[in-house]
Amino acid sequence: MSKKHKGDKFGFVYSTDPNFRMEEEQHSQETLAPSQQVLRVRLETKQRGGKAVTVVTGFIGTEEDLESLGKQLKNYCGTGGSAKDGEILVQGDQREKVLAWLLKNGYAKTKKMGG
């Protein structure tokens, strides 16, 4: 069943308040330089059907920059994955490759978490 009125991203279609104004929240955050990013690389297997996934967390910046970094990491590792909600997921146990790539490309404050 499709909606007749789509509304905006908050679901507002119409307001009867004559003083109502749509105020957009400013979520877009400036992306920190690679040398200022404090990234953590870890391996996760929970809730993934037993499959290992390398997770990179701690990225501060825009969603576009996060997706761009995720794409570069996935291309380097030759695997799939995704980038959303401040995390980059790379399929498989790619911790060593991801860590080496990040350090080589200026992400000096990157650390590997766990074994």
Image (cartoon, grey):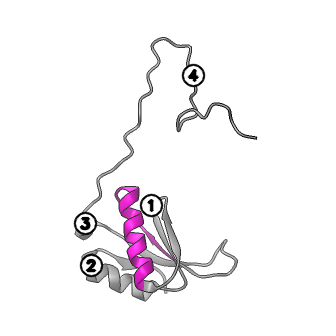
Residue 60: in magenta span: yes
Neighbour tally class for label 2: few under 14, some 14-19, many 20 plus, Cα within 10 Å: few
**Which residue is rendered at x = 37% and y = 83% of the image?**
99
Specify start and end residues of the magenta stretch as a single range.
54-76
On the image, numbered disc 3 is attached to which residue? 36
Instruction: Give the residue type that dot 1 points to.
Output: Gly
On the image, numbered disc 2 is attached to which residue? 105
Q: Position of residue 81 (x, y in %)?
A: 52, 74
Q: CA distance from mark 4 to mark 3?
A: 43 Å
Secondary-structure class at tag 2: loop
Asked if one can make out residue 59 in the rendered structure from this viewpoint, the answer is: no
Q: Position of residue 86 (x, y in %)?
A: 45, 61
**8 left or right of 51 in image:** left
Marked residue nearer the N-terminal end (2 or 3): 3
Marked residue nearer the N-terminal end (4 or 3): 4
Q: Position of residue 24 (x, y in %)?
A: 41, 34
Instruction: Give the residue type that dot 2 points to.
Output: Asn
Q: Give me the disc on residue 30.
A: none
Marked residue nearer the N-terminal end (1 or 4): 4
On the image, numbered disc 4 is attached to which residue? 14
Q: Is residue 13 above or below residue 111?
A: above
**Which residue is rendered at x = 48% and y = 11% of the image?**
18
On the image, numbered disc 1 is attached to which residue? 86
Question: In the depicted view, which residue is nearer to us: 61 or 77?
Answer: 77
